[in-house]
Image: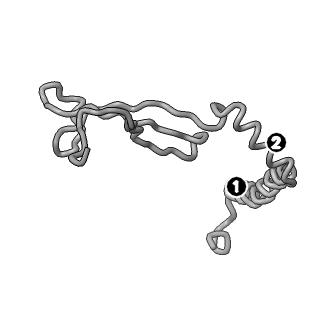
Amino acid sequence: MLEMFASPDPKKREEYRKAEKKPAEVEQALDKVREQIATPEHSLGYLEDIMNSPGDSLMMRSQSFCLNWKGVRVDDTPESEGNDITLAEFSVGEELRRSAVLVVFSLGSSEYEHPST
């Protein structure tokens, strides 16, 4: 709209031209990916590559911090009492990140016995 009332800015025109080309570039990249996994055999090969080297696709790192009884982080205040919690953060590239608490339950003998036993 500004170009209707003022002289066009050459920098803005160049940015606009680049932006117009982006969808075509993205579409070409998608076509290449589609060709790589076009058939079940290709898809299985792609999955096999991921399973053979999962560290290339899925990364995990540990996060530890201390929370007080209110659930407030108290790492910075050593005099505060709290409980340490460790999370596992999983990420796929840099786009998708999820945190999880990994819990293990033993099915063997335990200190607590069910009243019926």
Quarter of the N terminus within the rendering: bottom right
Q: Which mark is residue 37?
A: none
SS type, badge 2: helix
Name the foreground residue: 62 vs 105.
105
Percent position of residue 6, x then y: 64, 69
Disc 2 marks which residue?
A: 45
Q: Residue furthest top?
A: 78
Label 1 Cα crowd, 10 Å radius (few <14 / some 14-19 / many 20+)? few
Quarter of the C terminus within the rendering: top left
Percent position of residue 37, x then y: 82, 50
Q: How many angstroms separate mark 2 from mark 1 (CA)?
A: 39 Å
Question: In screen coordinates, is 115 left or right of 44?
Answer: left
Label 2 Cα crowd, 10 Å radius (few <14 / some 14-19 / many 20+)? some
Q: Is residue 54 above or below residue 35?
A: above
SS type, badge 1: helix
Name the foreground residue: 103 vs 70.
103
Percent position of residue 25, x then y: 80, 53
Q: How many marks?
A: 2
Q: Residue at x 35, y 30 (%)?
A: 64
Q: Amino acid at mark 1?
A: Glu
Q: Residue furthest front?
A: 117
Q: Is residue 45 above or below residue 23?
A: above
Disc 1 marks which residue?
A: 15
Question: In screen coordinates, is 82 left or right of 14?
Answer: left
Question: In screen coordinates, is 63 left or right of 67?
Answer: right
Q: Quadrant of residue 114?
A: top left
**Which one is closest to the eye, mark 2 or mark 1?**
2
